[in-house]
Image (cartoon, rainbow, N blue to C red):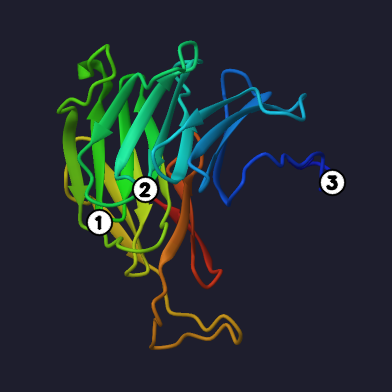
Amino acid sequence: TWDAGTGQGLCQYNEHQKRAWSVDFSQADPTKFASGSDDCSVKLWSINEKSSLGTLWSPANVCCVQFSSFSPHLLAFGSADYKVYCYDLRHSRIPLCTLAAHEKTVSYVKFLDSNTLLSASTDNTLKSWDLKKTYSDGSTTNTCCLTFSGHKNEKNFVGLTVLDGYIACGSETNEVYCYYRSLPMPITSYKFGSVDPISGHQTGDENGQFVSSVCWRQKSNMLVAANSTGSIELLKLV
Protein backbone atom coordinates (compact mmCIF):
# COMPACT_ATOMS: atom_id res chain seq x y z
CA THR A 1 0.00 0.00 0.00
CA TRP A 2 1.08 3.56 -0.78
CA ASP A 3 0.32 7.04 0.46
CA ALA A 4 -1.05 8.68 -2.68
CA GLY A 5 -0.30 12.14 -1.35
CA THR A 6 3.41 11.60 -0.74
CA GLY A 7 4.18 8.62 -2.98
CA GLN A 8 5.70 6.80 -0.02
CA GLY A 9 5.21 3.08 0.51
CA LEU A 10 3.34 2.27 3.73
CA CYS A 11 3.23 -1.49 4.07
CA GLN A 12 3.77 -4.82 2.31
CA TYR A 13 1.63 -7.92 2.85
CA ASN A 14 3.47 -11.16 2.22
CA GLU A 15 1.15 -14.10 2.90
CA HIS A 16 0.28 -15.09 -0.68
CA GLN A 17 2.43 -17.94 -1.98
CA LYS A 18 2.07 -17.02 -5.67
CA ARG A 19 1.33 -13.98 -7.83
CA ALA A 20 -1.38 -11.62 -6.57
CA TRP A 21 -3.65 -10.69 -9.49
CA SER A 22 -6.23 -8.39 -7.97
CA VAL A 23 -6.79 -6.05 -5.02
CA ASP A 24 -9.99 -4.22 -4.05
CA PHE A 25 -10.82 -1.91 -1.14
CA SER A 26 -14.21 -2.07 0.57
CA GLN A 27 -16.22 1.11 0.06
CA ALA A 28 -18.25 0.30 3.17
CA ASP A 29 -15.09 0.13 5.30
CA PRO A 30 -12.10 1.74 3.54
CA THR A 31 -9.66 0.22 6.04
CA LYS A 32 -10.49 -3.25 4.67
CA PHE A 33 -9.30 -4.74 1.40
CA ALA A 34 -9.10 -8.12 -0.32
CA SER A 35 -6.54 -9.72 -2.62
CA GLY A 36 -6.84 -12.62 -5.05
CA SER A 37 -3.91 -14.82 -6.05
CA ASP A 38 -2.63 -17.69 -8.16
CA ASP A 39 -2.29 -19.61 -4.87
CA CYS A 40 -6.07 -20.25 -5.08
CA SER A 41 -6.95 -17.92 -2.24
CA VAL A 42 -8.62 -14.62 -1.47
CA LYS A 43 -7.17 -12.94 1.59
CA LEU A 44 -8.99 -10.31 3.64
CA TRP A 45 -6.88 -7.54 5.16
CA SER A 46 -6.99 -4.43 7.31
CA ILE A 47 -4.56 -1.58 6.67
CA ASN A 48 -4.05 -1.54 10.46
CA GLU A 49 -2.90 -5.17 10.66
CA LYS A 50 0.17 -6.88 9.22
CA SER A 51 -1.51 -10.29 9.12
CA SER A 52 -4.60 -11.17 7.11
CA LEU A 53 -8.01 -11.22 8.80
CA GLY A 54 -9.18 -14.33 6.96
CA THR A 55 -8.82 -16.49 3.85
CA LEU A 56 -11.33 -17.74 1.28
CA TRP A 57 -10.18 -20.75 -0.74
CA SER A 58 -10.91 -21.37 -4.39
CA PRO A 59 -10.66 -24.64 -6.37
CA ALA A 60 -8.40 -22.82 -8.88
CA ASN A 61 -6.37 -19.63 -9.37
CA VAL A 62 -8.20 -16.44 -8.34
CA CYS A 63 -8.00 -13.82 -11.11
CA CYS A 64 -10.21 -11.01 -9.76
CA VAL A 65 -11.87 -9.95 -6.54
CA GLN A 66 -14.50 -7.27 -5.89
CA PHE A 67 -16.40 -5.95 -2.88
CA SER A 68 -19.99 -4.92 -3.45
CA SER A 69 -20.48 -1.18 -3.02
CA PHE A 70 -24.14 -1.92 -2.22
CA SER A 71 -23.63 -4.36 0.68
CA PRO A 72 -20.84 -4.23 3.28
CA HIS A 73 -20.76 -8.04 3.58
CA LEU A 74 -20.82 -9.17 -0.07
CA LEU A 75 -17.69 -10.11 -2.01
CA ALA A 76 -17.26 -11.87 -5.36
CA PHE A 77 -14.27 -13.37 -7.11
CA GLY A 78 -13.61 -14.97 -10.48
CA SER A 79 -11.55 -18.08 -10.95
CA ALA A 80 -9.58 -20.01 -13.56
CA ASP A 81 -12.13 -22.84 -13.17
CA TYR A 82 -14.53 -20.69 -15.28
CA LYS A 83 -16.74 -19.87 -12.25
CA VAL A 84 -17.67 -16.88 -10.12
CA TYR A 85 -18.00 -17.28 -6.36
CA CYS A 86 -19.99 -14.91 -4.14
CA TYR A 87 -19.51 -14.83 -0.37
CA ASP A 88 -21.34 -13.30 2.54
CA LEU A 89 -18.34 -12.44 4.73
CA ARG A 90 -20.40 -12.94 7.89
CA HIS A 91 -20.77 -16.63 6.94
CA SER A 92 -17.63 -17.36 4.96
CA ARG A 93 -17.39 -21.15 5.39
CA ILE A 94 -19.11 -21.81 2.05
CA PRO A 95 -20.00 -19.57 -0.94
CA LEU A 96 -23.31 -17.76 -0.90
CA CYS A 97 -23.58 -18.87 -4.53
CA THR A 98 -21.52 -20.24 -7.40
CA LEU A 99 -22.14 -18.89 -10.90
CA ALA A 100 -21.21 -21.12 -13.82
CA ALA A 101 -21.79 -20.32 -17.50
CA HIS A 102 -18.44 -19.06 -18.81
CA GLU A 103 -16.34 -21.37 -20.97
CA LYS A 104 -12.91 -20.01 -19.99
CA THR A 105 -11.19 -18.14 -17.14
CA VAL A 106 -13.15 -15.37 -15.41
CA SER A 107 -10.96 -12.27 -15.57
CA TYR A 108 -13.11 -9.55 -13.93
CA VAL A 109 -16.20 -9.19 -11.75
CA LYS A 110 -18.12 -5.95 -11.07
CA PHE A 111 -21.39 -5.25 -9.25
CA LEU A 112 -23.89 -3.41 -11.45
CA ASP A 113 -26.32 -2.96 -8.54
CA SER A 114 -27.23 -4.69 -5.27
CA ASN A 115 -28.62 -7.75 -7.05
CA THR A 116 -26.73 -7.86 -10.35
CA LEU A 117 -23.15 -9.00 -10.93
CA LEU A 118 -21.20 -8.64 -14.17
CA SER A 119 -18.34 -10.96 -15.12
CA ALA A 120 -15.80 -10.93 -17.95
CA SER A 121 -14.01 -13.95 -19.37
CA THR A 122 -11.44 -14.92 -21.96
CA ASP A 123 -14.30 -16.72 -23.77
CA ASN A 124 -14.99 -13.38 -25.58
CA THR A 125 -18.06 -12.58 -23.46
CA LEU A 126 -19.38 -10.61 -20.53
CA LYS A 127 -22.23 -12.07 -18.49
CA SER A 128 -24.81 -10.49 -16.23
CA TRP A 129 -26.08 -12.50 -13.24
CA ASP A 130 -29.26 -12.08 -11.18
CA LEU A 131 -28.18 -12.77 -7.60
CA LYS A 132 -31.78 -12.81 -6.34
CA LYS A 133 -32.33 -16.14 -8.11
CA THR A 134 -29.51 -18.01 -6.39
CA TYR A 135 -30.28 -20.83 -3.98
CA SER A 136 -29.73 -20.12 -0.32
CA ASP A 137 -27.63 -23.31 0.03
CA GLY A 138 -24.99 -22.03 -2.39
CA SER A 139 -25.94 -24.24 -5.33
CA THR A 140 -25.37 -23.14 -8.87
CA THR A 141 -28.51 -21.90 -10.60
CA ASN A 142 -29.30 -20.64 -14.07
CA THR A 143 -28.94 -17.02 -13.01
CA CYS A 144 -27.15 -15.70 -16.11
CA CYS A 145 -29.68 -13.21 -17.45
CA LEU A 146 -27.71 -11.76 -20.37
CA THR A 147 -24.53 -12.42 -22.38
CA PHE A 148 -22.70 -9.50 -24.01
CA SER A 149 -20.55 -10.15 -27.07
CA GLY A 150 -18.80 -8.20 -29.81
CA HIS A 151 -15.35 -7.52 -28.38
CA LYS A 152 -12.47 -9.97 -28.71
CA ASN A 153 -10.90 -11.41 -25.56
CA GLU A 154 -9.23 -14.82 -25.73
CA LYS A 155 -5.90 -14.37 -23.97
CA ASN A 156 -5.25 -11.09 -22.14
CA PHE A 157 -6.88 -9.18 -19.30
CA VAL A 158 -8.51 -6.29 -21.16
CA GLY A 159 -10.19 -4.30 -18.39
CA LEU A 160 -13.79 -3.88 -17.23
CA THR A 161 -15.58 -0.92 -15.68
CA VAL A 162 -19.24 -0.12 -14.93
CA LEU A 163 -21.15 3.06 -14.14
CA ASP A 164 -24.93 3.67 -14.04
CA GLY A 165 -25.70 0.70 -16.25
CA TYR A 166 -23.00 1.49 -18.82
CA ILE A 167 -20.28 -1.12 -19.26
CA ALA A 168 -16.89 -0.59 -20.90
CA CYS A 169 -14.26 -3.22 -21.65
CA GLY A 170 -11.14 -3.55 -23.75
CA SER A 171 -10.61 -5.76 -26.75
CA GLU A 172 -7.73 -7.60 -28.38
CA THR A 173 -8.55 -5.62 -31.53
CA ASN A 174 -7.01 -2.53 -29.84
CA GLU A 175 -10.49 -1.14 -29.22
CA VAL A 176 -12.68 -0.05 -26.33
CA TYR A 177 -16.24 -1.41 -26.42
CA CYS A 178 -19.20 0.09 -24.58
CA TYR A 179 -22.37 -1.85 -23.72
CA TYR A 180 -25.57 -0.96 -21.90
CA ARG A 181 -26.80 -3.38 -19.25
CA SER A 182 -29.99 -4.41 -21.09
CA LEU A 183 -28.49 -4.78 -24.59
CA PRO A 184 -26.36 -7.80 -25.63
CA MET A 185 -24.50 -6.01 -28.44
CA PRO A 186 -22.14 -3.01 -28.15
CA ILE A 187 -23.67 0.46 -28.35
CA THR A 188 -20.37 1.99 -29.52
CA SER A 189 -16.63 1.32 -29.80
CA TYR A 190 -13.41 3.29 -30.19
CA LYS A 191 -10.22 2.10 -31.86
CA PHE A 192 -6.81 3.18 -30.61
CA GLY A 193 -4.35 4.44 -33.20
CA SER A 194 -1.28 2.29 -33.80
CA VAL A 195 1.60 4.14 -32.18
CA ASP A 196 5.23 3.06 -31.99
CA PRO A 197 6.00 3.07 -28.23
CA ILE A 198 9.55 4.34 -28.81
CA SER A 199 9.14 7.01 -31.47
CA GLY A 200 5.54 7.94 -30.69
CA HIS A 201 4.77 7.93 -34.42
CA GLN A 202 1.72 6.34 -36.02
CA THR A 203 2.40 2.95 -37.59
CA GLY A 204 0.38 0.70 -39.83
CA ASP A 205 1.07 -2.42 -37.80
CA GLU A 206 -0.75 -3.11 -34.55
CA ASN A 207 1.54 -6.03 -33.56
CA GLY A 208 -1.06 -7.63 -31.32
CA GLN A 209 -1.88 -4.45 -29.38
CA PHE A 210 -4.88 -4.66 -27.08
CA VAL A 211 -6.70 -2.37 -24.67
CA SER A 212 -5.54 -3.43 -21.22
CA SER A 213 -7.35 -1.15 -18.75
CA VAL A 214 -10.50 1.00 -18.64
CA CYS A 215 -12.10 3.13 -15.94
CA TRP A 216 -15.16 5.40 -15.86
CA ARG A 217 -14.83 8.73 -14.10
CA GLN A 218 -17.45 8.74 -11.35
CA LYS A 219 -20.62 10.79 -11.98
CA SER A 220 -19.61 11.64 -15.54
CA ASN A 221 -19.57 10.25 -19.08
CA MET A 222 -15.76 10.29 -19.25
CA LEU A 223 -13.70 7.13 -19.64
CA VAL A 224 -9.94 6.67 -19.46
CA ALA A 225 -8.46 3.72 -21.35
CA ALA A 226 -4.93 2.41 -21.79
CA ASN A 227 -3.52 -0.11 -24.24
CA SER A 228 -0.67 -2.59 -24.17
CA THR A 229 1.90 -0.13 -25.55
CA GLY A 230 1.27 2.38 -22.75
CA SER A 231 -0.91 4.75 -24.75
CA ILE A 232 -3.68 6.40 -22.72
CA GLU A 233 -6.83 7.93 -24.20
CA LEU A 234 -9.49 10.04 -22.47
CA LEU A 235 -12.86 9.32 -24.07
CA LYS A 236 -16.33 10.83 -23.76
CA LEU A 237 -19.57 8.93 -24.30
CA VAL A 238 -21.93 11.12 -26.32
What's the CA distance linking mark 2 and mark 1? Answer: 15 Å
Q: Residue at position x 68%, y 23% from top? A: 31
Callout in the foreground (2, 1): 2
Q: Which residue is mark 1?
A: 124
Residue situated in front as seen by the camera: 109 or 181 = 109
Q: Residue at position x 52%, y 34% from top? A: 42
What's the CA distance linking mark 3 and mark 1? Answer: 39 Å
Q: Secondary structure at mark 1?
A: loop
Q: Is residue 72 left or right of residue 135?
A: right
**Mark 3 vs mark 1: which is more N-terminal?**
3
**Mark 2 vs mark 1: which is more N-terminal?**
2
In which image quadrant can residue 55 be found? Answer: top right
| Type of amino acid at the residue the image marks with label 1 | Asn
Marks 3 & 1, CB-CB < 8 Å contact: no
Residue situated in front as seen by the camera: 50 or 193 = 50
- Any part of residue 163 in sight: no
Q: Which mark is residue 35?
A: none
In which image quadrant can residue 10 be found? Answer: top right
Q: Secondary structure at mark 3?
A: loop
Q: Which residue is mark 2?
A: 80
**Mark 3 vs mark 2: which is more N-terminal?**
3
Position above or below: 178 against 138 = below
Q: Residue 111's x, y, as percent?
A: 38, 30
Residue situated in front as seen by the camera: 147 or 196 = 147
Q: Is residue 2 left or right of residue 130?
A: right
| Type of amino acid at the residue the image marks with label 2 | Ala
Q: Residue 200's x, y, as percent?
A: 57, 82
Q: Secondary structure at mark 2?
A: loop
Q: Which mark is residue 8?
A: 3
Q: Is residue 185 left or right of residue 158?
A: left
| Type of amino acid at the residue the image marks with label 3 | Gln
- Any part of residue 6 in sight: yes
